[in-house]
């Protein structure tokens, strides 16, 4: 019985030490992510995916202040289609989401 | 007549012992769970078959010089197979969700309470006649609460190789039972309003963060817990191969062919430890019981920690994701998502739960390292 008490004591010490180390280790990891990794992310952001030649042509005009009529047409077309779809079948689209 | 007698003595029927028949039935039970119930089939199928092979009389699969004895001594006793599997798991793991929300590491830490609390349970079982667990045995059993198969096998071979069969069966069975064990605990510890909580969208994570992360984890393990470096090191190697993007072939091999080959051999090797004398005793029942307790405590601690974090944090945290802190990737995260969807059909918690889920893998590897350092 005495040895069992001894074992319980050892298990208790192990639990205390174990939980403290696990929390300390993973908290340090949080610190590492929020400091080192976050700084690296700001300093070395992912390169923006290169755009195709076609869109580059459109972007040239956009850069000079104008929006290409092709883009305006595409966006307004998409918006109109979206509105039409949602005004016709609101319930079915909601069901699909669920 | 003599040759006929000799022939009869060389048959399985003449040599069967009751224990072998029972263990073959246990093997068939594992095959049933794998094939008919889809319980962790990747491991339970070879494990069940290994149990049948090792109990064939006369064939001597697990005796010195037998096929399974080579598999066990070469791959499991040395710790090679669990480590290769850990590398494959690293190559499959995306730490993006964890890096985007690093606080979830605390959930992975809290869920390890299951491991350490089970130590007491294992010691308490010594009061039952027929059970005699040392602290090493108790530590090997307790790691079942980490819900991480390779970690459990690695630690069991180091601390209590004679209990490996029962520990591996318990670990993989409970991992398969995650969708049954966890939801009642999660519902009992949370209110409907808490389960409905929607979490803010995660920020995008850059490539450099994902590349540096495994190196940072390895450095910290080297500095603070070198006993955990076999597990964490292989895990980080796999992850670095994945995220660096320069060794796609190696990453693909680690997460496909290599892990598959190793899983077959690991399953067979663990199955070879399912012999009657090692498995058919009261201790196995104790291990199976303790495994369930460890798992439940781990789940509960994760949920309670998430509740606490939700109370003190400015950003809302759904307590359900805490349950994913017990590794069992990705099943535990899927369960959190499913229970969340039951309360709020527009609440998709899967990506949020992946953070604590992979944190749990790291947490259980760290816990295994602590047990190895202090008990091993």
Image (cartoon, rainbow, N blue to C red):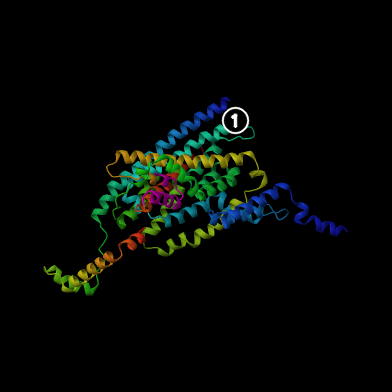
Q: Residue at x 50, y 31 (%)?
A: A10
Q: Nearer the viewer, residue A64 or B337?
A: B337
Image quarter of residue B130: top right
- Residue that sits furthest to the top in the current view: A2
Relative to residue B223, is residue B210 depicted above or below? below
* Residue B281 place in picture, x, y as percent: 65, 40
Residue most toward the left?
A: A65
Left or right: B363, with B166 as reference point: left
* Nearer the observer, A98 or B216: A98
Report the residue at 36% width, 60% height from top.
A95
Q: Which residues are magenta?
A: B322-344
The chain holding disc 1 is B
Relative to residue B31, is residue A54 depicted above or below?
below
Report the magenta stretch's main SS.
helix
Few, some or many C-alpha atoms within 10 Å of disc 1 (few <14, some 14-19, many ≥20)? Answer: few
SS at mark 1 in the image: helix
Residue B357 x, y percent position in the rendering: 41, 49
B341 magenta-colored: yes
State whether residue B222 appears in this view: no
Q: Quadrant of residue B1?
A: bottom right
- Residue placed under numbered mark 1 in the picture: B127
| Residue A56, position as x, y percentages in the image | 20, 72
Residue at horizontal 47 percent and vertical 31 percent from the top: A12
């Amino acid at each position: 019985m005495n040895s069992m008490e001894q074992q319980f004591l050892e298990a208790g010490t192990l639990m205390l030490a174990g939980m403290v180390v696990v929390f300390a280790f993973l908290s340090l990891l949080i610190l590492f992510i929020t400091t080192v990794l976050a700084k690296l992310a700001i300093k070395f952001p992912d390169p923006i995916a290169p755009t195709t030649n076609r869109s580059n042509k459109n972007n040239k005009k956009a850069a000079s202040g104008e929006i290409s009529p092709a883009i305006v047409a595409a966006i307004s077309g998409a918006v109109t289609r979206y509105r039409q779809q949602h005004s016709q079948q609101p319930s079915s689209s909601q069901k699909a989401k669920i | 007549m003599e040759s006929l007698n000799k022939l009869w003595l060389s048959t399985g029927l003449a040599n069967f012992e009751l224990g072998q028949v029972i263990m073959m039935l246990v093997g068939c039970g594992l095959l049933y769970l794998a094939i008919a119930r889809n319980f962790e089939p990747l491991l339970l199928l070879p494990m069940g078959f290994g149990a049948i092979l090792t109990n064939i009389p006369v064939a001597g699969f697990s005796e010195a010089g037998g096929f399974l004895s080579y598999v066990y001594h070469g791959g499991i006793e040395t710790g090679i197979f669990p480590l290769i599997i850990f590398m494959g798991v690293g190559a499959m793991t995306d730490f993006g969700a964890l890096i985007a929300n690093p606080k979830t590491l605390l959930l992975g830490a809290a869920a390890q309470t299951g491991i350490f609390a089970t130590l007491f349970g294992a010691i308490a079982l010594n009061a039952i006649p027929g059970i005699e667990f040392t602290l090493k045995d108790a530590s090997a059993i307790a790691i079942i609460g980490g819900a991480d198969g390779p970690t459990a096998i690695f630690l069991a071979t180091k601390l209590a190789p004679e209990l490996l069969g029962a520990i591996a069966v318990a670990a993989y069975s409970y991992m398969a039972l995650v969708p049954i064990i966890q939801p009642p605990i999660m519902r009992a510890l949370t209110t409907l309003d808490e389960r409905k909580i929607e979490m803010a969208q995660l920020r995008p994570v850059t490539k450099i963060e994902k590349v540096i992360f495994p190196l940072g984890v390895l450095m910290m393990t080297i500095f603070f817990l070198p006993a955990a470096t076999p597990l964490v090191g292989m895990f980080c190697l796999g992850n670095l191969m994945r995220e660096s993007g320069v060794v796609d072939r190696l990453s693909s091999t680690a997460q496909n062919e290599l892990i598959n080959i190793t899983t077959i051999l690991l399953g067979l090797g663990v199955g070879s430890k399912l012999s009657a004398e090692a498995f058919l005793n009261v201790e196995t029942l104790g291990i199976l019981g303790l495994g369930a307790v460890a798992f439940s405590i781990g789940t509960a601690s994760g949920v309670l920690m998430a509740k606490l974090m939700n109370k003190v944090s400015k950003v809302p945290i759904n307590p359900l994701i805490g349950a994913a802190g017990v590794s069992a990737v990705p099943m535990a995260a899927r369960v959190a998502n499913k229970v969340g969807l039951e309360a709020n059909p527009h609440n998709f918690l899967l990506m949020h739960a992946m953070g604590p889920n992979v944190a749990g893998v790291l947490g259980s590897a760290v816990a295994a390292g602590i047990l190895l350092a202090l008990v091993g």
